[in-house]
Image: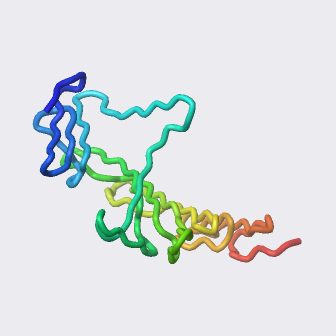
Amino acid sequence: YFTGGMGVGVLNTTAGTLNIGLTPPTTIFTGADLNITSESDAGMVINSFGTSALVYLSRANGTRAAPSIVANGDAFAIWAGSAFDGVDYETPASMRYEIDGTPGSNDTPARIVFLTAPDGSNAATERMRITSAGNIGIGTTSPQALFAVTGGRGTYVASDGNVGIGTAAPASH
């Protein structure tokens, strides 16, 4: 237990959690190990001088004592934003880092998936992804070209630079 600029801090050594801010601490995400709550701006600042400042998120399956390999499709990091809709907190947008293939020793293919909720909904759905092959897809979960936009006629940019509208295999001219 401590007090400071943001109010009260509670370290729960039994649960392994740290709550900073209001008493009792409130959270919109159950299972959080660190909860910062404020009646005004709440935030976290990381300063670094001379080297990079970073936020490092990692995941392993198994346990802390016996970690095991992640699997294709596993999310290993998620950045999400929640907003109060007048009834409860919803998560209308997020960015997920996922395993994109079969991992092995010194081989961990990954993709980044962007999700947003449309007007009239609170369900975030995938809008864009960058695959482990470097392909970018908007409106598709499996872009087969460097840049693929689907919906309507679709636009594709092949690795050779050819652009196709309405075709996934643009021809060179």
Residue 105 in view = yes
The residue positioned 53% from the left and 72% from the top of the image is 105
- Depth check: 56 or 134 in front? 56
- From the viewer's side, name the closer residue of 1 and 128: 1
**Rendering colour mode:** rainbow
Apparent side of residue 129 relative to residue 84 in the rendered image (left or right): right
The residue depicted at 28 percent of the width and 52 percent of the height is 90
Residue at (57, 62) in percent of width and height:
130
Q: Quadrant of residue 45?
A: top left
The residue at 46%/30% (across/down) is 47
* Residue furthest to the right: 173
The number of numbered discs placed on residues in the rendered structure image is 0
Q: Position of residue 77 (x, y in %)?
A: 41, 57
Q: Where residue 70 appears, x then y in whole percent?
A: 42, 71
Q: Is residue 140 visible?
A: no
Q: Quadrant of the C terminus?
A: bottom right
Residue 16: x, y in percent?
19, 49
Residue 67: x and y, percent? 35, 68
Check the image and report above or below for 153 versus 90: below
| Side of 153 relative to 77 (left or right) | right
Question: Where's the N terminus, which quadrant?
Answer: top left
Q: Is residue 83 above or below residue 46?
A: below
